[in-house]
Image: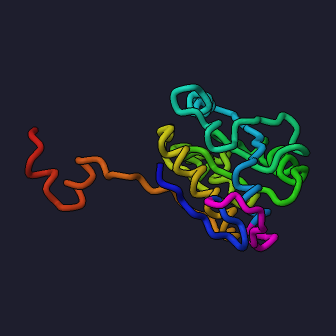
């Protein structure tokens, strides 16, 4: 069996000698926050089913350290806004955000939470970033669970790095039809 050596300060795994490790306190705190997110789901519409599917055993959001939902905003540091937000719900969402403990992060789940979706009327809020700051926007109607997990990992990277600018989750691969449209070949290949 090959022995491996890890040099971290005076810590030596090969010899079993006790020592010490060095790190910055803020880096250690960011690492702890990254893997201990307490989420508050604010689900209002059909994306709520997709959110539950992401938390289920197939996609298992628990493996990212974000499995403990809190049903009081005072105990949560991650707000998932899942679904359409109407103008009447906007003050309630703002109050919930204000009640959360610092530091806090927000993920807009789906197109309706990000930009109002296909609702182009006076009753729907055209994106929750009009009333609260958003860290991650996950597009899709509804978004795929893989995109949701990508958004969660992006947020964890932001927590570790300290960035607070809004980020959009981009797809891994563009759908074939969209690639053809961008290359200008969709009309010539599609039949009547």
Q: Residue at x 80, y 46 (%)?
A: 93
The percent position of residue 154, horizontal first and vertical second, equals: 57, 57
Residue 184: x, y in percent? Answer: 17, 60
Relative to 107, is 73 on the left or the right? Answer: right
Residue range corresponding to the magenta coloring: 14-27
Residue 9 spot, x, y in % from top left? 71, 73
Along the line of sight, the residue nearer the viewer: 80 or 190 = 80
| Residue nearest the viewer, comparing 140 with 104 | 104
* Residue 29, image quadrant: bottom right
Residue shown at the point (71%, 42%) measured from the top left:
86
Depth order, front residue of 12/53: 12
Answer with left or right where residue 149 lies relative to residue 77: left
Give me the residue at 73% from left, 62% from top.
17
Give the color scheme: rainbow, by chain, secondary structure or one colour: rainbow
Q: Is residue 34 at least partly visible in the picture?
A: yes
Seen from the viewer's position, the closer of residues 68 and 16 is 16
Q: Is residue 18 magenta?
A: yes
Q: Quadrant of residue 67?
A: top right
- Image quadrant holding the C terminus, namely top left
Q: Quadrant of residue 102?
A: bottom right
- Residue at horizontal 88%, vertical 43%? 75
Is residue 169 located in the magenta-colored stretch of the structure?
Answer: no
On the image, the x and y values in percent for residue 31 come to 72, 60
Report the predominant secondary structure element of the magenta stretch: loop
138 relative to 165, above or below: above
The answer to whether any part of residue 141 appears in the image is no
């Amino acid at each position: 069996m090959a022995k491996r050596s890890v040099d971290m300060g005076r810590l030596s795994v090969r010899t079993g000698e006790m020592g010490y490790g060095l790190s910055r306190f803020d880096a250690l705190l960011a690492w702890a926050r990254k893997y201990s997110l307490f989420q508050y789901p604010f689900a209002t519409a059909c994306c709520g089913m997709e959110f539950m599917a992401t938390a289920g055993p197939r996609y298992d959001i628990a493996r990212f350290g974000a499995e403990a939902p809190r049903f009081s905003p005072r105990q949560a540091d991650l707000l998932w806004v899942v679904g359409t937000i109407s103008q009447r719900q906007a003050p309630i969402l703002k109050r919930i955000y204000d009640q959360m403990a610092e530091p806090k992060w927000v993920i807009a789940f789906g197109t309706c939470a990000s930009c109002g979706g296909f609702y182009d009327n006076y009753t729907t809020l055209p994106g929750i970033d009009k009333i609260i700051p958003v860290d991650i926007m996950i597009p899709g109607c509804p978004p795929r669970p893989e995109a949701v997990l990508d958004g969660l990992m992006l947020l964890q990277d932001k927590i570790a790095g300290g960035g607070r600018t809004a980020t959009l989750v981009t797809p891994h691969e563009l759908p074939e039809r969209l690639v053809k449209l961008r290359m200008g070949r969709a009309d010539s290949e599609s039949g009547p």
